[in-house]
Amino acid sequence: MTHVLPGTRLLASATVVAEDPAEHSANKPSFYADPAAWLVAEAVDRALAECAEPVLDDADDTGIVVMSATGSERTMRDIARAALRSRVSPLRFAGANPGVLAGLSAIRHGLRGPSLVLAADPDTAAPVALTVIEGWLADGQARHVILAGLRPTPDGCLCRCEILTEPAGDR
């Protein structure tokens, strides 16, 4: 997945592969997010660390789009099993929301631009995501956009993250 359209410029990218997304979890008793969200957050962290521009200086103007057909499936299954046995913490429900895939990175980095989670495989969702991103950049809704694609692999999960912006001449 490398997505550079005529209306965008690639600033950085990173890929994280994990046998179990929980390897990257930093859940606490007072804060829970699905392991897939932590894997996305790790890919976002790595891409931001490689970024050629200070994207986080424009946190108000930085958006995020995440594409995933599996989303927060793991936590939803865990909640369903736990609900049959006993009471479930409300924190688990918040951490199971598919929006947590984009929300966790937004919270960690103070992003206040637009956000979107597309519940589809990255290959299928990419044209829609890129159309949305191109619109956000063209309309000034965002100056930078983080695009992440999460997919299962035979050995676990892979998350690819790219940071896109408008072409240099458009500033």
Image (cartoon, rainbow, N blue to C red):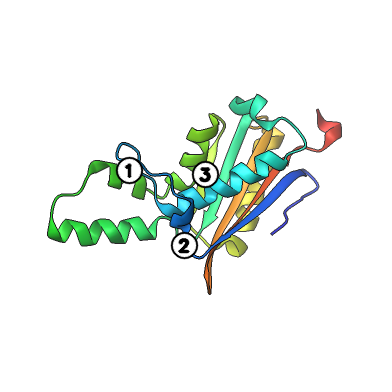
From the viewer's side, name the closer residue of 13 and 123.
Answer: 13
Residue most toward the left? Answer: 86
- Can residue 100 be seen by looking at this rendering? yes
Residue at the spot 53% in from the left edge and 45% down from the top edge: 41
Marks 1 and 3, how far apart in space?
Answer: 17 Å
- Residue neighbourhood size for the residue with mark 3, other residues' Cα within 10 Å, grouped as few (<14), some (14–19), many (≥20): some
Say which mark, if any, is on residue 94: 1
**Quick one: quadrant of the C terminus?**
top right
- Residue neighbourhood size for the residue with mark 2, other residues' Cα within 10 Å, grouped as few (<14), some (14–19), many (≥20): some
Q: Are marks 2 and 3 in contact (CB under 8 Å)?
A: no
- Residue neighbourhood size for the residue with mark 1, other residues' Cα within 10 Å, grouped as few (<14), some (14–19), many (≥20): some
In this rendering, the label closer to the viewer, 2 or 3: 2
Asked if residue 102 lies left or right of residue 129, the reply is: left
Residue indicated by mark 2: 20
Q: Earlier in the sequence, mark 1 or mark 3?
A: 1
Q: Earlier in the sequence, mark 2 or mark 3?
A: 2
- Give the image quarter of residue 49: top right
The amino acid beneath tag 2 is: Asp
Marks 2 and 1, how far apart in space?
Answer: 21 Å
Q: Give coordinates of residue 68: x percent, y percent.
A: 51, 58
Q: In the rendered view, tell whether residue 68 sits above or below residue 51.
A: below
Q: In the rendered view, tell whether residue 56 sits above or below residue 91.
A: above
The amino acid beneath tag 1 is: Ala
Q: Give coordinates of residue 149: x percent, y percent.
A: 58, 56
Residue indicated by mark 3: 116
